[in-house]
Amino acid sequence: MMSLKQLRIVSVFLAVCILCGNFCSGFAAATAGASPSIKSALAETGTYLQKTAVHPEVGSIGGEWAVLGLARSDCSVPTSWYSDYYQTLISYVQQKNGVLSSTKYTEYARVVLALTAIGKDPSDVGGYNMLQSLSDYQKVTAQGVNGVSYALIALDSGNYPIPAPAEGTVKATRQLLIQKLKSQQLPAGGFSLDGTTADPDVTAMALQALSPYQNQSDVKNMVQKAVLSLSNVQNKNGGYESSRTEDAESAAQVVVALTALGIDPGSDSRFIKNGSSVLDNLMTFYVPGGGFRHIEGDKIPNGMATEQGFYALVAYERFLNGKNALYDMSDATDRTAGQNSGSQGLPNKNQDVKKLPVLYPGKTFEDISGDSFQKAIEALAARGIINGVGSSVFQPNRTMTRAEFAAVMVRALGLVPSGSSGFSDVPKASWYAPYVGTASAYQIVNGISKTAFSPNQTITREQAAVMVMRAARLCGLETDMTDAETLDLLAQFPDYTKSALWARNALAFCYQNDILSQSMLLIQPQKDVTRSEIAGMADQMLQKARLV
């Protein structure tokens, strides 16, 4: 038996153990309570982003990345916030005439990603196609790995077709861009901006771009090497450093890359060092109340770190919940309550008529300077409606054939050229057959008989007026005129009686809507119309129809 003294010693020991146990449990609970959860960090940072970017702008901070992150999250965001950004973007793009940058094509990719995230069409932003610049292989690749990576990410975010490039440029294709990344991968598997030292940010971005192509054997090998590289350069505390400084952004990009590849950044052993994962490291930069620091020691949130840290957590949350990856936006919906792209058209237009975005900003020709219709020619050429005769000249005084005119009208209305014309003198294999077929199907053009179209015959002013009037009707313009109204408009021209009876209503309509100028002394109805004049007619019609 134990003595009384021994019992007292044992009792004291047990009491101390109990007290210590309670203290440790309380300390552990307090520690767990002080460490913010990813869920609370998302909620608080989502609110913080909306407070710091009350009116989101076009830019890398307080703009597209904030819009993308919030749109891909479960945070509650007013529709008006997204609409505000969208309207700001439209105004900005129009002010810049569609040219966001002549050197940094990642500007276009960033905008495409934000638009896709909020369910808007990047091919028509105030009449400009934001995808167009991503079709220029030389310009995209000029920014190195980042340029190529973000072009692929943007194009794949909505599975967008790559537009035809401007004349004289090499068209970017997905495979060309992938091969470019392959040539830029370092022997150890990483990627860099300088071509020598692997950078975790750049490597992660390349992996984000390559993630949809892992079914290709060469891409799979590239991915495996890059993932190994990221694991090898990870710091002992689970973080990453860029330019010899550990920062939140590097960890954020790795988290996005791993989730895109189907790898859990919080539990995969390759990305846990000394018990700390890359996700754990990212959370060390979190500022309670919302936001992320750039580097250790910063006291307040940093704009770029906050946006990247936020969308990295969004990517992780989506991964955990089995949702699409951050940049796989096939599940995106319109966040602006159907806000228009800035191009409305008339309410009564045919539903197949579409406004064409600007494809070739600044397009011009060396032989149109000073031409009366220079602006009209440039406006149509920029949208791919009318072409030059070669890459640099337009030949404004040259005539136009009936087939060429049919093609201009079909393009101007955004109709899809397809089908057979049904005319015996329009060969099915000819370039103009689908245009004549579509123009005929929409009753823009008729044949010279039931079986013949005479595609190579030049078009006269009165024939052009009739075809433009029919196109205008499809655009929703009111084209009916009484005989008295027609006579009143045409009587001012001494030669109006020379016009065909079937053309007079159309001629009057064109004069009434300034599609033809009343300042001219004569109609000259049977005179061949020039390419320059046709551009002027088509452009004015589109303006009246609110399609440019």
Image: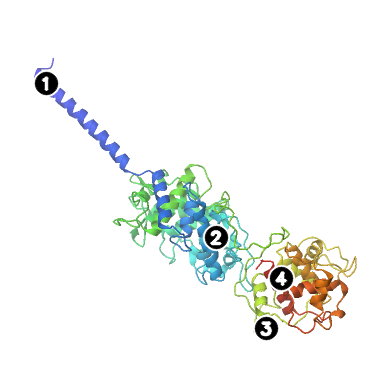
Residue 391 against residue 290 in the figure, above or below: below
Q: CA distance from mark 2 to mark 3?
A: 36 Å
Sequence-wise first label, 3 or 1: 1
Residue bearing mark 4? 541
Q: Residues within 10 Å of mark 1 (few under 14, many from 20)?
A: few
Q: Residue 6: which disc?
A: 1
- Between label 3 and label 1, give the one nearer the viewer: 3
Secondary element under disc 3, as helix, strand or loop, is: loop
- Tell me the element at label 2: helix
Q: Residues within 10 Å of mark 3 (few under 14, many from 20)?
A: few
| Cβ–Cβ under 8 Å for marks 4 and 1 | no
Could you tell me the amino acid type at mark 2? Val
Precedes in sequence: disc 2 or disc 1: 1
Find out whether the residues at labels 2 and 3 contact each other: C-beta distance under 8 Å.
no
C-alpha distance separating marks 4 and 2: 31 Å
Asked if the residue under mark 4 is in contact with the one under mark 3, i.e. CB atoms within 8 Å, the reply is: no
Q: Earlier in the sequence, mark 4 or mark 2?
A: 2
What residue did someone put label 3 on? 371
Return the residue at label 2.
Answer: 112
Q: Nearer the viewer, mark 4 or mark 1?
A: 4
The residues tagged by marks 3 and 4 sit, at their Cα atoms, a distance apart of 19 Å
Can you tell which of label 3 and label 4 is closer to the viewer? Answer: 4
On screen, residue 478 versus residue 116, left or right, reads right
Q: Mark 3: which amino acid?
A: Asp
Determine the secondary structure under disc 1: helix
Q: Nearer the viewer, mark 2 or mark 3?
A: 3
Looking at the rendered image, the disc whose residue lies closer to the viewer, 4 or 2, is 4
380 over 212 or under it: above or below? below
